[in-house]
Amino acid sequence: MQPIARSRLLPRISFRLVMFLTALAAGGSAVARAAGDGGVLAKAMVTIMLVLAFFFLASTLSYLLAWTIARIAVGRADNSLKGNPFSKDQLPPQVIRPREPGV
């Protein structure tokens, strides 16, 4: 018997994950429906979900902004080729050039 070859074109998503996401979406829909009908607790839960979603969106955007700035700055001054002065068995880079002996 030959082993079953998995397709590389399809994403590897398990059935359990799909069912969990479906249940999560159904729960969110029920809470949103209750909030639309005037439920105070449901409105609070929807507000909390929106605040958390906005927080993660803002965090992602700020990370991408910082990453973009870092990628642009590395192009100008790349210090990665000089080595790490704190690593073991490596001398730090010389800032002042050595003098000739006897001078």
Image (spheres, rainbow, N blue to C red):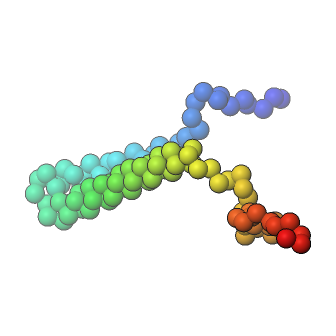
Residue 84, image x and y in percent?
A: 72, 63
Is 96 on the left or on the right of 12, as rendered? right
For residue 38, which quarter of the picture?
Answer: bottom left
Q: Residue furthest bottom?
A: 102
- Seen in the picture, residue 88 relative to 38 is either above or below; the reply is below
Q: Nearer the viewer, residue 32 or 23?
A: 32
Is 65 on the left or on the right of 32, as rendered? right
The answer to whether one can see residue 23 in this image is: no
- Give the residue at x 59% y 38%: 12
Residue 21, image x and y in percent?
A: 42, 47
Is 77 on the left or on the right of 31, as rendered? right
Q: Residue furthest left?
A: 38
For residue 98, which quarter of the picture?
Answer: bottom right
Q: Residue furthest front?
A: 103
Please tell me how many numbered marks the rendered image carries.
0
- Give the residue at x 19% y 50%: 33
The answer to whether one can see residue 59 in this image is: yes
Residue 22, image x and y in percent?
A: 39, 45
Q: Nearer the viewer, residue 77 or 51?
A: 77
Quadrant of the frame with the N terminus: top right
- Give the residue at x 20% y 64%: 44
- Give the residue at x 71% y 51%: 81
Q: Residue furthest right?
A: 102
Quadrant of the frame with the C terminus: bottom right
Q: Nearer the viewer, residue 63 or 23?
A: 63
- Seen in the picture, residue 89 relative to 25 is either above or below; the reply is below
